[in-house]
Amino acid sequence: VQLVGTGGTLAGLSKFMKEKNPDVKIIGAQPAKASRRTPQNPNPNTIDGVLAFDGVPSQSIPTFFDEDNLPYDECIDILAEDAYETGRKLVKSDGIFLGQSAGAAITAATIVAKRPEAEGKNIVIILADNAFKYLSTNMYKE
């Protein structure tokens, strides 16, 4: 499970992994619509540094994404509040101090792991941030 800032990690790892095993499933996660800034909702809880990438207009697709052969098989929308909750739970239960995108990635991986077809499968998650820069955000305010 991977979230996207620039898209480079998702595209590069997907290409490499699919060359090694064409049956691997690449699942991206992005902020749900309610967790994205819009003129109508300028201050939602967000997953900082993570961009929506599924369903963007073709002129906005990064050049290293092939529009006819996208580097992911599925995209899961994650609410910022769910990512925050995952991060808070893991710091309390396991001492793993996660940032917003890492909380979102684990939330998405948890969704995938609960699927019947995931039984006995390995799930790899990219955790690209820690929580130090989020201490003053809604993620860790209680």
Image (tube, rainbow, N blue to C red):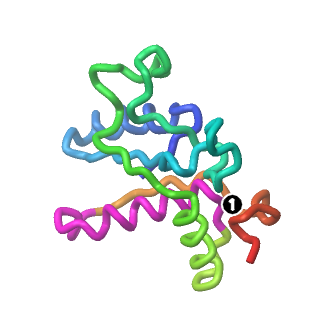
Residue furthest bottom in the image: 93
Does residue 99 lie above or below 23 as drawn? below
Residue interval drawn in magenta? 98-121
User: Where is residue 139 drawn, in percent x and y?
Assistant: 69, 66
According to the picture, the residue beneath numbered tag 1 turns out to be 130
Tally the marks: 1
Q: Is residue 34 left or right of residue 42?
A: left
Q: In the image shown, does 60 or 122 lie closer to the viewer?
A: 60
Three-letter residue code for mark 1 = Asn
Q: Quadrant of the C terminus?
A: bottom right
Quadrant position of residue 111: bottom left
Q: In the image shown, does 18 or 45 lie closer to the viewer?
A: 45
User: Where is residue 109 drawn, in percent x and y?
Assistant: 40, 61
Q: In the image shown, does 134 or 34 lie closer to the viewer?
A: 34
Q: Residue at x 28, y 39 (%)?
A: 20
Q: Residue at x 51, y 57 (%)?
A: 79
